[in-house]
Amino acid sequence: MNYLVTIGLEIHAQILTRSKMFCGCSADYADAPPNTHVCPVCMGLPGALPTPNRRAIELAALTGLALNCRISHENVISRKNYFYADLPSGYQRSQYDDPLCVDGWVDIEGDNGPKRIGLTRVHIEEDTGKLIHTNDGGSLVDFNRAGVPLMEIVSKPDIASPEEARRYFQKLRQILVWIGVNSGDMESGALRCDANVSVRPVGQQEYGPKVEIKNINSFRFVERALAYEIERQIRALESGEPIVQSTRGWDEASGTTVAQRTKEFAEDYRYFPEPDIPPLRLTDAWVAERRAELPELPDARRQRFVEEYGLTAYDAGILTDERAVSDFYEQAVAAARARGVTPKDVANWMTGEFFRLLKETGETLESATQRLRAGYIGEVQELLNQGVITRTSAKEAFEASFREGRSPATIVAERGLAVIGAGDALTDLVRQAIANNPKVVEEYRRGKGTAIKFLIGQVMKATRGQANPQAVQQALEQELAQE
């Protein structure tokens, strides 16, 4: 490739609070009738005074700490002036020169190995309302979302490909959901992305003109939109067409980016400090309190799972993809160790049968674990280790525990799943298999030793996998030797 690609992402993440950023209106707008969660403050009416949401600021600072940022002790809320139908006040309360969090990073798997993506800033602002375009060419506005707390997370131009952009966006979403500051719901707009991309020939030091692709709400669309825009810019360069710094939108139907407007510059927004909100002064003690709220993060927990529990990097990655899964796994390990069951055995049940059943039923982890106790995983593995049940019976008992919420030991007893290892019952089944398969028996007696495997299979089938295979083979050999 004869061109260098430079990408930076601006991630807009709604902050999970009960009320809006500068008023007491509910921030839960998803199912509310239009324009019912509004008041004079979030509607921007003259004389209405804003009050900053303390919890939103705390969660934004928590985000900054999770992203390795420095927290600024002096913060100014500014007015970003631009006129659009979904901004009732005609300006957006945001931050400009004094962002809350600065100079962080996120580690991802780059195209050529581990890579660190730098962050310029994380700042707080308020979300806009929602425009609804009608079939007759008109537009309606729902202001329920206007004023909902929002963070903007701005990366440095360290991303070199659409694939790296997708991985970075995925990693950022994982962290935000993990620490409980964002729902991760991209369909509703709780998390969305603006992508800045430029292309320049190899050897050129100066960046090419930057094009911003607005409001992308899925990982796949980020990758596709950037791939298309890179190709578009390369075609323009090779044909001698100028690339203008501009804003474009992603059209999913056509798979193309579409011109919207010439790119604004910061001075076009006429930022100035919000006169109704004094500067926010954050102390060292306040920052220390936020740091104490920070949980163990995904990368650290994944590494600990490898070192402490002896998991493979792959299993540890799967089990730390979501915090709720990771927490449930640790609960299961704690219960299983008392039974002599290893963390690796618990991981095998989690990544195998448990995830299969979640996918098959469409259930969430939260609803499934209201029935399936964490200790049931160790219990079913203990029964297997003790030879009480076979692997096939263990899977049946585990699935029944998942669906019914009862202990594996109870299910094994009620369903008669215990291993058939010896005695008259096994002898009868062995004799029946011999009687039903005379040709196979003849092959065995002529010296074809592998023929006994077929007979073992017939007995195992008759017992629904409950027989001990070694005991079955021994019983077959004894019976065949007598005839």
Image (spheres, helix red, strand yellow):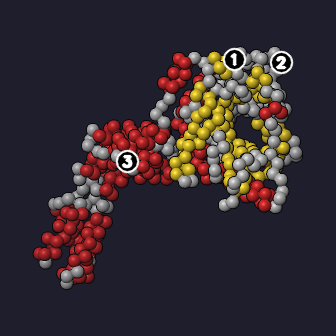
Single out the mark in the foreground, 1 or 3.
Answer: 1
Residue 287 position, x and y percent, is 55, 22
At label 2, the amino acid type is: Pro
The three-letter code of the residue at mark 3 reads Leu
Q: Amino acid at mark 1?
A: Pro
User: Mark 3: few, some, or many residues within 10 Å (few <14, many ≥20)?
Assistant: many
Q: Earlier in the sequence, mark 2 or mark 3?
A: 2
Q: Residues within 10 Å of mark 1 (few under 14, many from 20)?
A: some
Above or below, comparing residue 47 to residue 392 in the picture = above
Q: CA distance from mark 1 to mark 3?
A: 49 Å
Residue 311 is labelled as 3
C-alpha span from label 2 to label 3? 60 Å
In the displayed structure, would residue 75 be above or below residue 255?
above
Q: Quadrant of the C terminus?
A: bottom left
Q: Position of residue 123 (x, y in %)?
A: 66, 30
The image quadrant where one finds the N terminus is bottom right
N-term-proximal mark, 1 vs 3? 1
Q: Position of residue 477 (x, y in %)?
A: 16, 71
Q: Residue at x 51, y 21 (%)?
A: 288
Residue that appears at 73% across and 17% down: 277
Q: Quarter of the image holding residue 435?
A: bottom left
Q: Is residue 429 visible?
A: yes
Query: Would you identify the image quadrant in which residue 332 lies?
Result: top left
Task: Give the SS element for disc 1.
Answer: loop
Chain-order first, disc 2 or disc 1: 2
- Position of 53 with respect to 353 (left or right) is right
What is the spatial separation of the Cα atoms under label 2 and label 1, in whole angstroms?
21 Å
Q: Nearer the viewer, residue 243 or 92?
A: 243
Residue picked out by circle 2? 46
* Residue denoted by label 1: 279
Left or right: 247 as drawn, with respect to 166: right
2 or 3: mark nearer the eye = 3
